[in-house]
Amino acid sequence: MKSYWISLYLKVENQDNLKKYAEVVTPIIKSFGGVPLVRGGKHETFEGDDFVRTVVWEFPSYEKAIECHNSKEYLAGWDLAKDTTVRHMQVIEGFSTE
């Protein structure tokens, strides 16, 4: 079953740090089978909080998504932005209607 990383950014205090983070972690995430589906972009909030940025990655499985997040390579990349970025981040398993 495919799974998804969903990151909802509340605050980005340093765009350069976030850019460096993205440059470092993108190939790491892809090496675990991650495929970017949403990375910022035009949006409109109809209900609830308005996040400054939303990022969604699709993974081939829940286990691969967790393995990627917990990898020393990814965590080292997150160190570049974590002190200047506030986000909600979760991994969630998809489902099938078939």
Image (cartoon, rainbow, N blue to C red):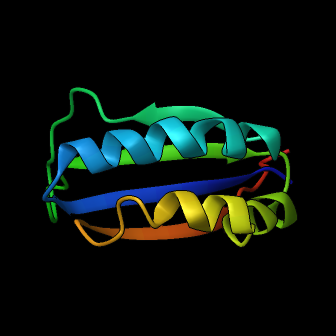
Number of numbered markers = 0
Horizontally, residue 10 falls left or right of residue 33, namely left
Horizontally, residue 7 falls left or right of residue 62, namely left
Residue found at x 71% / y 72%: 70
Residue found at x 53% / y 70%: 90
Residue 50 versus residue 57 in the image, above or below: below
Residue 41 appears at what percent x and percent y? 27, 28
Question: Is 11 or 75 nearer to us in this picture?
Answer: 75
Residue found at x 72% / y 68%: 72
Q: Is residue 93 visible?
A: no
Residue 57 versus residue 72 in the image, above or below: above
Q: Residue 55 appears in which quarter of the rendering?
A: top left
Residue 2 appears at what percent x and percent y? 79, 50
Residue 81 appears at what percent x and percent y? 35, 60
What quarter of the picture does the C terminus occupy?
Answer: top right
Question: Is 47 or 91 nearer to us in this picture?
Answer: 91
Q: Residue furthest top?
A: 42
Residue 1 appears at what percent x and percent y? 86, 54
Residue found at x 71% / y 56%: 94
Q: Residue 48 appears in which quarter of the rendering?
A: bottom left
Q: Is residue 76 visible?
A: yes
